[in-house]
Amino acid sequence: MHRAANSLGLVLVTLACWLYAYHLYVDANRSLYAEASDKRPAASANVPPSGPIASGPAMDDSSDGILTFVHASDLHISKYVPQGGLVHFQHFLHTALPLISPRLAVVTGDLTDGKDRQRLLSQQQIDEWRAYEHALDAANVTTRFNGSFYRDQRGNHDCFNILDEQASENLYSAHSAVRDSSGYLLKIREPFGEYAFVASDACPRHGFARPLNFFGALDASAMALLEQRLDAARNANHTFLLNHYPVSTTVYGRHSRPFAELVRGVSVVLCGHLHELVGGLGAQLQAFRAREGYWELELGDMKEHAVYRVYAVDNDLISFVDVTLPLAPLPLPNPKLLDAVPPPAPIAHPPVVLVTNPKDARYLLPAHEPLHRMRNSRFIRMLIWADQPIKSVEVRIDGVLHPHAAEYRGKEYSVENAAPDELVKIPLWTAPWDPTIFEDGRVHQIEVTAIDAAGKRGYSHTPFTLGDTAMPLDNGARGGWIMRQNFADMFRISGTASYLLMSVCLLLVPRIWFVMQKDPVAWVTSRAILHHQDHAHAMQLQRLVLRALRGGSILTAVKPALALVAARTKFLVLSQFTAQVCLAGVPWLFWPAYFFAMSIAVLPLFVGRLIPSAPAVLGSVYTYGIFIAGEWSPLLDSWTYALATICSLGVLLLYLAVAVTPPSLFYSCSGTVPWYQRRLIRYAMATFVVVYLGLPTLMTAYAYGWISIMLGFGKAWLLIAACLALYRIDWQKHGAPSHGLFPQPSSPAAISRSSSSSSFM
């Protein structure tokens, strides 16, 4: 009865902790969802009207019906980084924009770097913001087209270390082009249609210092504003949604409609943030969301790669080309002082070629584009921007020279009420063709080579098909997999599952099993005999496999090899469970481990000055979000911290359980572990504690104050407990301490003799 009461008490305490943890989770995510009284009646889905798709003339050789805009991202203007950043951005302003002369230029965040000299801590640097503002003024982009030419928005670096939008550290509100942290809605009206650009701001309401500022979030109020803007853009031919964070790295709340329903009227989502990752992993961070019907196109950074993207909407067919500024080397060196960077002279730029008809078969938008216009068109259409007159244009289809020469049909025009010298360039080249020749269901290739008067060469290679089915992008290994994920669900599910597995399988069940044993020593002895039998059986199977392989009979070795894998798996699982039961019988190890397992669920992982510019405001990092200034920020960054803590505690529990278990349970042949193997295992575990617990704890204290050590329940306290446990078990100089309630089982020889005369199930 006493054992049952102990077990029941442990279960009840655990369930109470988990119920409170669920309460914290609900409370942390409450800001993501509007209260019932605040919800508006659900409106119809934001779908585009059928007019622009169903109607319209066939595409001829006219330059009418074309809208162009340029996208750049992640400038990272820095006073401490010696390369890239400001110099690249200035070349973009003084070379790329005059070359393309688009109707609109948009920049999706991370305008400044916002780090200190060591690039470990984060803070808003007034010099960086002044350099950005001076660059805009020198290029005269903020006033062009009556202020409708240039748009920018915040990225996570632009909201580092900012308590709220009213804080003096919010330099975006004073030195940017838009200056409205909530984003914007811009409608461009042309004779051939209306095009909407909606920028949403997913920066957290409280801008934490790095590294707690990687993921974005749109709470219910931000979603209400986004919903309002997207509803206002419902009648646009195309709607472009701009955000610094990709959809996969953003937590979306809900007002009256979920995000997946809101974006059904969006054609393209433009974003940045991920740069190009590492090792080519982010070379093509693009994904088609078939369910919602939009393309998400992430753009590499201006900071190091000096890349920008040119979009053209030609008779409502959307095409784009990525262009790298012709700078050598990359990244370009910066002067030591930001104010010593004069506006650069335009540099020679090779022609930029973009084929708009036929459109790239990989990026079709059947729900938003009039794809039938390609089948009814009479001309190949291509835009060729050049800083010198074009000398020749060569078109090849499937490797065969096109029989008709390309001719210039471009124009320049001015926006209403704009200055006379503020022009939009539409450098259209066309060549007659018969699209019915290529209506065979196959993917064809069109290649365009343009050479200007200075001999500079531009090239475009575009796959196309005249059907309505897009060609697979096949970019899974180059970033597509990342763009298609839902990291919010991934972290929440994996964090919850790993926590439950760790706490239930490594703590609760072993403890209950231990408590329910009348004679734990006898149980351990019987388990040692069973494990010895399993080990002997596995060794016999291993000999059979080796004998079959030496005889050259691979097929004969398959069956015993599979049996060997099953036997080894059984041995590892059962012997590890026995070790966990032994750990449950060591009070000075089990109860601290249980405390840390429960604290992950109900206590903050650490408390610190998460916004150093407001040192009096402390923030608490829970698993489910960050609590600061009386409200929750449900960021995924806290889940990454929790996952690291859960994994660290799980590894410690697995190791400590084996360390306190009699060696004969695992080394049935010798009964002891070789000294060098013991030393290597100890060094490996010590390295793990230093790398995965010690260094992050010190970094947290360095970034958020030493108070995070004193109130670091899930970080600093766990580190101290791990060091004490490892020292007492592995590194105590005066002999190994008593490892618990279990004496050393019988010697391996005795176990072997006992196993031959005993039977245990």
Image: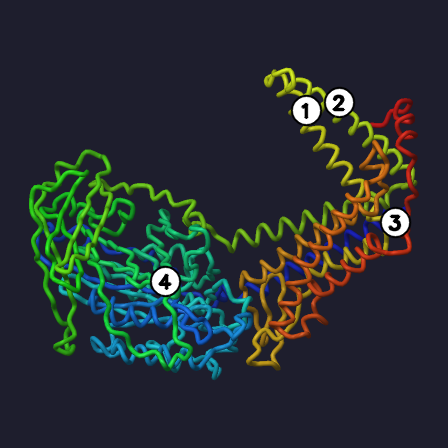
* Badge nearest the viewer, 2 or 4: 4
Using the image, tell me which numbered label, if any, was put on residue 330: 4
Tell me which numbered mark, 3 or 1, is placed earlier along the sequence.
1
Q: What quarter of the picture does the C terminus occupy?
A: top right
Q: SS for tag 1?
A: helix
Q: Amino acid at mark 1?
A: Ala
Give the image quarter of residue 75.
Answer: bottom left
Relative vertical location of residue 88 with respect to residue 545 in this rendering, above or below: below
The residue under label 2 is 540
Q: Amino acid at mark 4?
A: Leu
Give the image quarter of residue 135.
Answer: bottom left
Q: Amino acid at mark 2?
A: Gln
* Badge nearest the viewer, 1 or 2: 2
Relative vertical location of residue 524 with respect to residue 315 in this rendering, above or below: above
Image point (27%, 49%), residue name: 365
Q: Amino acid at mark 3?
A: His
